């Protein structure tokens, strides 16, 4: 007998994790697959952070911590936000979670009721829509394609707002596009939001430091909306700590309490050892960020150059994160040498995996059919070979 809840049956599986799994299955069969599907830095966690984790074990930081995290870590996050972003969140307004993913889900579950609308600019990370669905809310998608550099305009935002709008969820730098909203672009969105005091702003800033523009503006830095802006961030991307699972929300006090109440009932605290490692990340030397960022920028330039030379691909120049989101609509409707038709970007992504042995992710998973996402968080050698394979595989379609 099986009985799966309607809640879980309604959820879509994570497309990025699914493609990564298929890639690993082929690798297990001996196929030489280059995996460009996962958003994960290929660098090792910096030594001083790993040493802090070892010390934490030796010093017996092995017991339950407060649900929102060690106060020392929350103070470090508070100081980081003040120093780097010019925003003020007391340590009591910080809740540390099992990755930024849980931090996001916590906030959505703590604020969204059935019937509430959440505006999400598309394309967007695969889990946003599913989290809103889990809370019983309704996603209002605002589409911005490559001609807009994948960025929503103030007019589009205003048109999407209804009396049921409860939240805007904005990711900058963006997964899956790498686009970054400039201060001027954010200011224009804030002018719209200022007219609607009941709309919260959930700002996913996890890619903040993988940024090739030289500057970053947090949504919480605008006084007009500061008291209703929630920042999501963590150590995964900036410090190459994906497996450590430490993220946080910085929120108004009333919401931080609600998030801690929720988390206290279904996971309690994040790993005590990982928390001490994250504390070292925030309080220790920061040169590792610049070193990794320099490598990502070089890879960005390499991938954009190689992709631009492939006939039919339309590419922009991402300003951050480690993704390229090329338009592939020129290949939709074509046929493989075996006579199968490529009817969607999902078909194309699967063909690139099975024939070209390169794992990408279908743009439809991010709410934008006719595109694919490539992660360039891998070696230059892998990227050159992957783009060569992609070019050859696409050339085989007719």
Image: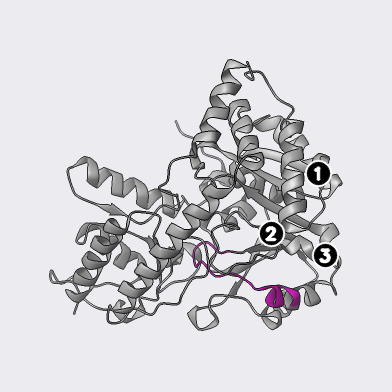
Percent x, y of residue 22: 31, 48
Q: Which residues are magenta?
A: 173-187
Q: Is residue 265 above or below residue 216?
A: above
- SS at circle 1: helix
Q: Is residue 362 something that shows in the picture?
A: no
The disc at residue 225 is 3
User: Is residue 393 visible from the viewing direction of this image?
Assistant: yes
Q: How is the image coloured?
A: one colour
The residue carrying mark 2 is 203
Residue 178 part of the magenta-drawn span: yes
Residue 204 picture location, percent across and down: 64, 57
- Dot placed on the residue nearer the N-terminal end, 2 or 1: 1
Residue at image point 65% right, 36% down: 279
Q: Are marks 2 and 1 in contact (CB under 8 Å)?
A: no
Mark 3 → mark 1, Cα distance in angstroms? 16 Å
Question: In x, y percent, where is residue 330?
Answer: 32, 81
Q: In the rendered structure, does residue 312 fall within the stretch colored magenta?
A: no
Judge by depth and name the residue closer to the eye, 170 or 239.
239
Quadrant position of residue 261: top right
Mark toward the start of the polypeptide (3 vs 2): 2
Secondary structure found at label 3: loop
Q: Classify residue 186 as left or right of residue 366.
A: right
State how far apart marks 3 and 2 are (Cα): 12 Å
Q: Position of residue 383 (x, y in %)?
A: 30, 61
Q: Please tell me whether the stretch drawn in magenta is mainly helix, strand or loop.
A: loop
The residue where tag 1 is placed is 93
Label 3 neighbour load within 10 Å: few <14, some 14-19, many 20+: many
State yes or no: discs 3 and 2 in contact (Cβ < 8 Å): no
């Amino acid at each position: 007998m099986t009985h799966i809840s309607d809640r879980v049956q309604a959820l879509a599986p994570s497309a990025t994790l699914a493609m990564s799994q298929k890639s690993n299955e082929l690798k297990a069969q001996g196929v030489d697959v280059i995996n460009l599907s996962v958003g994960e830095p290929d660098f090792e966690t910096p030594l001083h952070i790993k040493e802090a984790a070892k010390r934490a074990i030796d010093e017996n930081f092995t017991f339950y911590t407060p649900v929102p995290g060690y106060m020392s870590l929350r103070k470090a996050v508070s100081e980081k936000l003040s120093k780097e972003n010019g925003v003020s969140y007391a340590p009591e307004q910080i809740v540390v979670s099992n990755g930024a993913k849980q931090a996001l889900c916590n906030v959505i579950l703590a604020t969204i009721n059935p019937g509430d609308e959440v505006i999400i600019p598309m394309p967007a990370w695969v889990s946003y829509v599913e989290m809103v669905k889990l809370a019983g809310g309704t996603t209002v998608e605002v589409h911005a394609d490559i001609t807009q550099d994948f960025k929503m305009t103030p007019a589009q935002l205003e048109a999407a707002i209804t009396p049921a709008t409860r939240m805007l969820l904005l990711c900058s730098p963006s997964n899956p596009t790498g686009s970054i909203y400039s201060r001027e672009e954010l200011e224009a969105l804030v002018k719209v939001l200022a007219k609607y005091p009941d709309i919260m702003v959930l700002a996913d800033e996890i890619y903040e430091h993988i940024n090739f523009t030289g500057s970053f503006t947090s949504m919480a830095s605008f006084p007009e909306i500061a008291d209703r802006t929630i920042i999501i961030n963590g150590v995964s991307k900036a410090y190459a700590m994906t497996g450590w699972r430490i993220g946080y929300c910085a929120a108004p006090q009333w919401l931080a309490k609600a998030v801690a109440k929720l988390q206290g009932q279904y996971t309690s605290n994040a790993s005590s050892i990982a928390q001490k490692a994250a504390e070292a990340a925030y309080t220790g030397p920061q040169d590792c960020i610049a070193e990794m960022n320099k490598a990502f920028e070089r890879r960005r330039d390499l991938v954009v150059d190689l992709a631009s030379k492939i006939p039919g691909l339309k590419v922009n120049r991402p300003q951050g994160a480690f993704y390229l989101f090329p338009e592939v609509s020129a290949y939709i409707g074509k046929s493989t040498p075996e006579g199968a038709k490529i009817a969607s970007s999902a078909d194309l992504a699967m063909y690139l995996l099975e024939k070209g042995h390169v794992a990408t992710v279908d743009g439809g998973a991010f709410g934008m059919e006719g595109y694919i996402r490539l992660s360039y968080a891998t070696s230059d050698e892998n990227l050159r070979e992957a783009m060569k394979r992609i070019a050859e595989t696409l050339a085989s379609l007719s």
